[in-house]
Image (cartoon, helix red, strand yellow):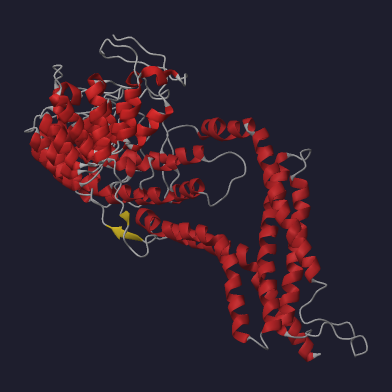
Amino acid sequence: MASVSNAAMHPRLLMAACIGDTQQLKDLLDEGSSVGTMHPGFVVRVDVPQPSTATTLLDVVTAVEGDSVLHVVAAGGDGDAFLESAEVIHDRARHLVAMPNRNGDTPLHRAARAGNARMVSHLIDLANKADEGLVVKELVRVENRLGETALHEAVRVGHRGMVIRLMEEDAELAGFPRDGASPLYLAILLDQAGIARSLHDMSDGNLSYGGPNGQNALHAAVLRSEVVTVMLLRWNKTLTEQGDHDGCTPLHFAASQAEERNCRIASHSKFPWLRLRTSSTTNNIPLLLLQANPSSAYQPDDVGSFPIHVAAAVGASRTVSTLVEMFPGCAGLHDANGRTFLHVAVEKKRCNVVKQACGNPSLGWILNMQDKDGNTALHLGVKAAESDTFFHLFGNRQVRMDLTNNNGQTCRDLSLVDIPPGLSYKWNPKQMIHRALTRASASHGVRRWDQFEEEYILRPRREDEETESQKLNNSTQTLGISSVLIATVTFGAAFALPGGYVADDHTNGGAPTLAGRYTFDIFVVANALAFICSSLGTVGLMYSGITTVDLPIRQRHFLRSLFFVSSSLTSLVVAFAWGTYTVLAPVAHNTAVAICVISQVVVVYRSIGRFKRMIDLVRPLYVRAGIRPLLMLAKDVFTRMLRLYWPFVVIFSWAACATNHAKLA
């Protein structure tokens, strides 16, 4: 180990190295080492043998990374001036060409990282000309603290010429490091197919395929493109058998990619912000892997998940279909929890995979399989509370509703258990699922109902009374704001009627000028009904928010208030639409009509979700139980529409009666 100098790199020396000023560099070196101690503060660390001479300007390094002058020149550029500067430095301190900095980088690393291909070639030539017995192969194989050689840096910057130059010097360089990310893995990761091909060809196939965490290059390739995947499979099919530290094979990785279309930004387009839609380049990769190694479909990872489970978890229905078509038996494979791919798809709410499985007659044998807890896919569908997923299972008559899990619960029992105690929205998926099972006459488990009710309904309700009270308080505050706001708006509108008032010096002075018109009567009635309903809702909310009132009474008041506030909103929309129509119709009839139509979006939007779920339930309920439950569903739809839209009936009927009465009078 050579002695270490505490001298600092002179600023003029650093500047000359950075800009490639060869003449200034020579002048400074000729001046001797006396200027080398003018600016202390840089620590020098030299880990390779040096000539046993006095401290010179070339014995110092920068403070941050510990770069020598040759590091600085190598990273500065690869013009003629920089090449000449590197040669001047090497002639006076040949040991610097292999000296690492604090990160383990040699000047060759720095030159490659900067993309200075001529400098890389020049440093190799300088090392070849050295008369100290320095082996160039040892230089290019030096690994930094990340375990990377200069070849890694060349691959990272995507410079194929630099890669070729390094490989010409050492054909085995692509085999380093023995452990960790290889240059080939890095090239595949960066989707550099040309560089990957050069690494393979110049090493005659004797290169490392390794990657981090036990992965190989094929793990990265399947996530990049079909081109590099085919290329690697042609070189080495055994890569398909290798798992990473978690036991995941390349097929697991490929199966984890959901089918989605890629977006590409055209870099040379006049409109670079426009994203061009292109088809995915990885959709066929699972098929390629299966053709190369069919047994990989039956290779689990360390937690027992097979590729089909992974594909189901991300909703890759095309991959699931490929696996089932090529290897029908893999549909029944169980993971560590005893689940099939259908269990996984239901639990992850992958509706497309569930729909595909339920629509494939050849998969009927897995529909009622139970996991280690005894749950079928339908049990998990109830627990997941995803209505679309549940409806696909519910609408398949091969799916049994009477199977019990290890707790003795059928799907209907489970649907009742999962409904939270206390108040809840009637059209939540959990409530809809329970009603669907009830109307389809699904069976309960073999248990006394009073015991079941006590354990799963009454006891949780008593235990959660404080939580329910807090939930009711929060809901009351939110609804109260809307109720008071509507009451305020309608109260103000009652004294600011559209069209203004008759002048005091005329007959009926102070009366509304538009009184007696049908549209005006609609506005007045709607506004009054909105005020009345919001006021009733406010009164009910006062009781529902008082903690001294018994919880059941508070809940009833809240439900009534919810009905009245909802009705007041409907009435307010009608008042706005027809008030606007009344004043605009004489001068802009089309605009007035448009406003009336658009305003109803508020009313429709409020209930569109629940009606959609009702419609989605029609087909599976009919398939499962016939026409009778549909009549009950139709009754629900009619009742719901009446509760939502009764203000329309009252408003227009009242206004029509008032107008007719005025005409008769």
Q: Quadrant of the C terminus?
A: bottom right
Residue sitting at 46 percent across and 56 percent down?
613
Residue 249 occupies quadrant = top left
Q: How many marks?
A: 0
Q: Nearer the viewer, residue 523 or 362?
A: 523
Q: Nearer the viewer, residue 299 or 553?
A: 299
Q: Position of residue 129 (x, y in %)?
A: 13, 25
Q: Position of residue 512 (x, y in %)?
A: 82, 82
Q: Is residue 551 above or below residue 32?
A: below
Q: Nearer the viewer, residue 461 or 535?
A: 535
Report if residue 248 is visible in the image.
no
Q: Position of residue 400 (x, y in %)?
A: 33, 43
Outermost residue toward the left?
204
Residue sitting at 66 percent across and 69 percent down?
573
Residue sitting at 84 percent across and 82 percent down?
501
Horizontal arrangement in the rendering, residue 487 relative to residue 296 (left or right): right
Q: Quadrant of the N terminus?
A: top left
Q: Position of residue 416 (x, y in %)?
A: 50, 40
Horizontal arrangement in the rendering, residue 521 relative to residue 255 (left or right): right
Report if residue 200 is visible in the image.
yes
Horizontal arrangement in the rendering, residue 534 relative to residue 417 (left or right): right
Horizontal arrangement in the rendering, residue 381 relative to residue 189 (left or right): right
